[in-house]
Amino acid sequence: MKNIPSSLNGKNLNVNHTKNAHHLDTEQDLYTQELGDNHIGGAYNTPLRDDAFIMNDDEKIEKITTHFEQIMQILGLDLKDDSLKGTPKRVAKMYVKEIFKGLNPAQKPAITLFDNKYQYNQMIIEKNITLYSTCEHHFVPIIGKAHVAYIPNGKVIGLSKINRLVQYYAQRPQVQERLNNQIGEALKEALNTEDVAVIIDAEHLCVASRGVQDISSSTITVFYSGKFNDENTRNEFLKFSK
Ligand SMILES: [Zn+2]
């Protein structure tokens, strides 16, 4: 097993990592932007360390492969078996390049806005957006739907960008409450409006397949901002998102 870099304790960030310095700057800058000026990790921010991007993707995949191999070894699995030998690398790539890809702010979708030339000033709802995330307490899937609404303020968003934004925040270890808030806040910022609502209705496999093994329950979280705090507006959204 290779040594875990001393940087993992959150200090000594610059030792032996000069070749990734540029990489670090860019992604760290993006992350800082996402945190906002005060750089305080609040309820909306995924708890990432300052040195989260000191390693590049390939280095992360290599390290996770080694560690996952050890987990499998400890479980007693025979890694010489044809079916198992590729698993550690496969899992490592899946973590870094797919299901936890959204930890990296460089992956945040660029949002294009269009002029609202039809002068449409009622709510726009996009419902049943497929959502796959991962419970950060058990590292098993959260599967559900997101329903999003906003009232345009001069500009409108390309509809597929809403799906991409949902996906970006879902591709992190998450708790549903935070995921819901992150999507809501990101939309407010992207659309330059307070008038945003987001509902997530999701099943947590940590509840369904283990623990209490309740396969019929789902968890609903909501984010209402601006005009969606008004009961009529909110009810209209709820009616259409059913
Ligand atoms: Zn869980």
Image (tube, rainbow, N blue to C red):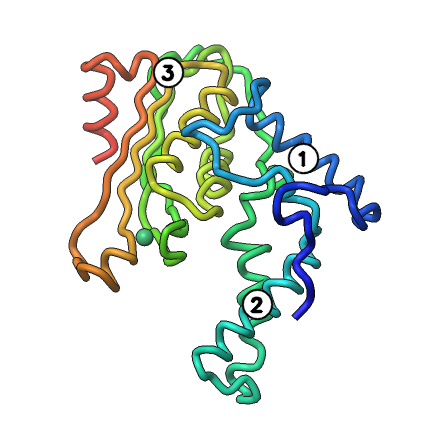
**Precedes in sequence: disc 3 or disc 1:** 1
CA gap, disc 3 to disc 2?
45 Å
SS class of the residue under badge 2?
Answer: helix
- Identified at 54% across, 74% down, the residue is 70
- Relative to 16, say whether 198 is above or below: above
Label 3 with label 1: CB-CB less than 8 Å: no
- Percent x, y of residue 133: 41, 49
- The one nearer the camera, 9 or 206, is 9
The residue carrying mark 2 is: 67
- The one nearer the camera, 95 or 14, is 14
**Residue 93, disc:** none
The residue carrying mark 3 is: 195
**Local crowd at mark 1 within 10 Å, few (<14), some, or many (≥20)?**
many
SS class of the residue under badge 3?
Answer: loop
The residue carrying mark 1 is: 28
Please, which residue is most extreme toward the right here?
19
- Identified at 21% across, 47% down, the residue is 218
Q: Amino acid at mark 1?
A: Gln
- Relative to 184, say whether 92 is above or below: below
Q: What is the quadrant of residue 11 in the picture?
A: top right
Nearer the viewer's eye, disc 3 or disc 1? Answer: 1
- Percent x, y of residue 10: 62, 42
Q: Amino acid at mark 2?
A: His
CA gap, disc 3 to disc 1?
30 Å
